[in-house]
């Protein structure tokens, strides 16, 4: 994404704007995590590598903050997240058998 919002926020319904802002923020944080982890894997200086990985961890916290807020604002998203977790649990249980 690298600092470009992937859609026109002015075209979003007013009741959905906060949810879309939160989703955009999550996308940006995930993008930043990927960037910092990729840069860390290329860094030759161990101090630089450590700083990049530390910043990536901070971005993961930001994902958690935005996701928590999104789940508060979007009941359907919260329900579907739970359903996804249940599906993964079921699949993993099947693989163990």
Image (tube, grey):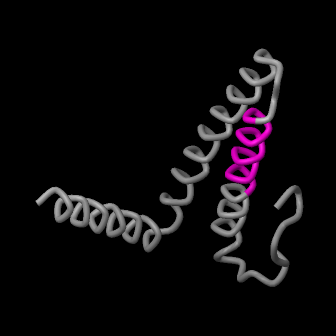
Question: Looking at the picture, does residue 18 appear above or below residue 63?
Answer: below
Q: Which quadrant is the C terminus positioned in? A: bottom left
Q: How many marks?
A: 0
- Kindly indicate the quadrant of the structure image that contains residue 37: top right
Q: Is residue 78 left or right of residue 89?
A: right
Question: Magenta region, mostly helix, strand or loop?
Answer: helix
Instruction: Please tell me whether residue 33 belongs to the stretch shown in magenta.
Output: yes
Q: Is residue 94 left or right of residue 21?
A: left
Residue 47, position as x, y percentages in the image: 78, 15
Magenta region, residue range: 28-41
Task: Determine the residue positioned at 41% across, 64% down.
Answer: 81
Task: Determine the residue positioned at 20% across, 61% down.
Answer: 95
42 or 89, which lies in front? 42
Residue 15, position as x, y percentages in the image: 65, 76
- Kindly indicate the quadrant of the structure image that contains residue 36: top right
Instruction: Please tell me whether residue 7 belongs to the stretch shown in magenta.
Output: no
Point out the residue furthest to the left here. Answer: 97
Residue 31, position as x, y percentages in the image: 74, 53
Residue 10, position as x, y percentages in the image: 85, 78
């Amino acid at each position: 994404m690298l600092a470009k919002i992937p859609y026109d926020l002015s075209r979003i319904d007013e009741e959905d704007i906060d949810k879309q802002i939160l989703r955009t923020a999550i996308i940006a944080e995930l993008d930043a995590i990927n960037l910092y982890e990729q840069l860390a894997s290329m860094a030759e200086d161990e101090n630089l590598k450590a700083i990049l990985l530390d910043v990536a961890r901070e971005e993961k916290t930001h994902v958690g903050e935005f996701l928590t807020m999104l789940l508060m604002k979007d009941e359907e998203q919260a329900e579907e997240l739970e359903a996804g977790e249940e599906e993964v649990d079921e699949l993993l249980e099947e693989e163990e058998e």
